Amino acid sequence: MIRRISKQQQKGSASKRQTTMKQQQNGDMDNDLHELFLDEIADITNAERQLTKALPKMAKAAESDELRQAFESHLEETEEQISRLEQAAQSLDESIKSKTCKAMKGLIEEAEEMMKEQKGTSALDAALIAAAQKVEHYEIATYGTLIAWAEQMGHSDAAGYFRTNLDEEKAADEKLTTVAESIANEKAEAGKGQ
Ligand code: ZN
Ligand code: FE
Ligand code: FE
Ligand code: FE
């Protein structure tokens, strides 16, 4: 964004004008980044809200008890994450804007498509895990960015809330890897017995 220099600034001495321009540029950068930061908070909040609707469906579809439980416990965490995002906004004296996260909409649509295609096959849980891990990685990327921006702008309370959410997303991703391995091992064991 380019702003015009005011008449008053133009009248100032060359060195003073430079200082003023620099300050104004820094000010623009702060405001622009802060706006982007608020948009991103709105985006991830909507993404988390979409997940509170998708996770129960994924839990219901899961064949393995371990996978179903992983989805159910991540649903509870997701609800907590939304309240942490609200607390983060409060710490900034801001309210969360309404926005649709198109990326999460797409990831969930793809998950639903995979569920339909794999229904009744032995690869259904593998498909659910693949879709869920894509979701976790999207969230990990977003919280990583939010933490960096919050720290850059000195919003340390908000950064703390994002960090807690990030840690849960990373743990959820790792849990899915563990569940995938245990399902694969069970299938291999069952195969040996035949
Ligand atoms: Zn800011
Ligand atoms: Fe989440
Ligand atoms: Fe998004
Ligand atoms: Fe998650």
Image (spheres, rainbow, N blue to C red):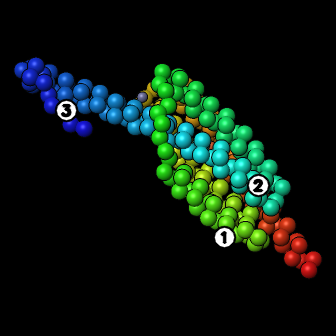
Q: Position of residue 92 (x, y in %)?
A: 48, 23
Q: In terms of image quadrants, where is residue 143?
A: top right
Q: Which residue is mark 1?
A: 117
Q: Is residue 174 left or right of residue 156?
A: right
What amino acid does circle 2 point to?
Answer: Lys
Residue 82 horizontal/vertical position (percent): 61, 35
**Residue 166, quarter of picture:** top right
Residue farthest along the right direction in this orientation = 193
Mark 2 residue CB less than 8 A from any atom of ligand 4: no
- In the rendered view, does 101 fall on the left or right side of 171? left
Amino acid residing under circle 1: Glu
Describe the element under mark 1 as helix, strand or loop: helix
Report the Cα–Cα distance between label 3 and label 2.
54 Å
Identify the residue position indicated by label 3 in the image: 3
170 vs 36, left or right, is: right
- Specify which label sits upstream in the sequence, 1 or 3: 3
Q: Reading the chain from its start, which is encountered first: label 2 or label 1?
A: 2
Residue identifier under label 2: 60
Residue mark closest to the camera, 3 vs 2: 2
Residue at screen point 80% across, 49% down: 69
- Residue at 67% x, 34% y is 80
As measured in the structure, the alpha-carbon distance from the residue carrying label 1 to the one carrying label 3 is 53 Å
Give the crowd class for mark 3: few <14, some 14-19, many >=20 residues within 10 Å: few
Comparing 6 with 90, the one in front is 90
